[in-house]
């Protein structure tokens, strides 16, 4: 077999099986998958393709990341979540390689493309604000109950107590 044939075999395997999505993929694993000696695969990547193993695999992972980031069904994932889904096993490796390949950070790239991705800080702030809103709503309900109860004590209408309890039950449950 020639280098061109081996290269074609490698590219077909990468395209069909997407082994780069496995974060634990090694040169030895990939060589075994295409029935090639690891030294031959290393030579093929370095001399025929012009990349080392990590550069070769990470290029595919970056493209997988871009594809996943563009997909509407992944809008609930963070950048790091998408990176892990694309086969990267470390945040720093992903960011380093992405910046080297594209010249920008993943967030800058996505912003430039107009692909909005969930930001975990925004999630935390939103969750916190929701808790404040719920607490304030509950406080307002308790205040209304207190006002009605005090009014009942002054006027002596027992039916107000029943109304305020049902009001509390409706809003709390």
Image (tube, rainbow, N blue to C red):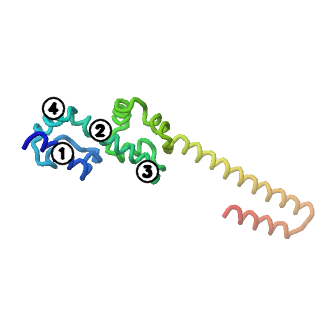
Choose the circle earlier in sequence order: 3 or 4: 4
Q: Position of residue 164 (x, y in %)?
A: 79, 64
Quote the CA–CA distance across marks 3 and 4.
35 Å
**What residue would you read off at disc 4?**
47
Choose the circle earlier in sequence order: 4 or 2: 4
SS for callout 3: loop
Quote the CA–CA distance across marks 3 and 2.
20 Å
Of labels 3 and 2, the one closer to you? 3
Q: For mark 1, does the 10 Å Cα neighbourhood hold few (<14), some (14 to 19), or many (20 or more) residues?
A: many
Q: Position of residue 19 (x, y in %)?
A: 25, 48
Quote the CA–CA distance across marks 4 and 2.
18 Å
Of labels 1 and 2, the one closer to you? 1
Of the numbered discs in the image, which one, if any, rests on residue 71? 3
**What residue would you read off at disc 1?**
10
In the depicted structure, whether residue 135 falls above or below residue 90: below
Of labels 4 and 2, the one closer to you? 4
Choose the circle earlier in sequence order: 3 or 1: 1
Q: Is residue 133 left or right of residue 42?
A: right
**What residue would you read off at disc 2?**
58
Q: For mark 3, does the 10 Å Cα neighbourhood hold few (<14), some (14 to 19), or many (20 or more) residues?
A: few
Q: For mark 2, does the 10 Å Cα neighbourhood hold few (<14), some (14 to 19), or many (20 or more) residues?
A: many
Q: Quadrant of the C terminus?
A: bottom right
Q: Position of residue 63 (x, y in %)?
A: 34, 42
């Amino acid at each position: 077999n020639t280098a061109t044939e081996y290269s074609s075999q490698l590219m077909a395997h990468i395209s069909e099986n997407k082994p780069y999505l496995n974060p634990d993929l090694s040169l030895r694993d990939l060589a075994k998958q295409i029935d090639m000696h690891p030294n031959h695969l290393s030579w093929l990547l370095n001399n025929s393709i012009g990349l080392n193993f990590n550069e070769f695999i990470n290029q595919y992972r970056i493209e997988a990341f871009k594809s996943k980031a563009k997909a509407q069904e992944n809008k609930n994932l963070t950048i790091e979540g998408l990176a892990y889904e694309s086969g990267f096993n470390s945040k720093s490796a992903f960011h380093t390689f992405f910046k080297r390949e594209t010249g920008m950070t993943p967030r800058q790239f996505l912003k430039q493309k107009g692909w909005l991705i969930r930001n975990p800080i925004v999630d935390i702030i939103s969750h916190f604000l929701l808790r404040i809103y719920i607490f304030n709503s509950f406080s307002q309900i308790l205040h209304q109950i207190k006002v009605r109860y005090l009014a009942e004590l002054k006027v002596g209408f027992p039916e107000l107590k029943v109304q305020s309890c049902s009001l509390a039950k409706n809003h709390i449950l």
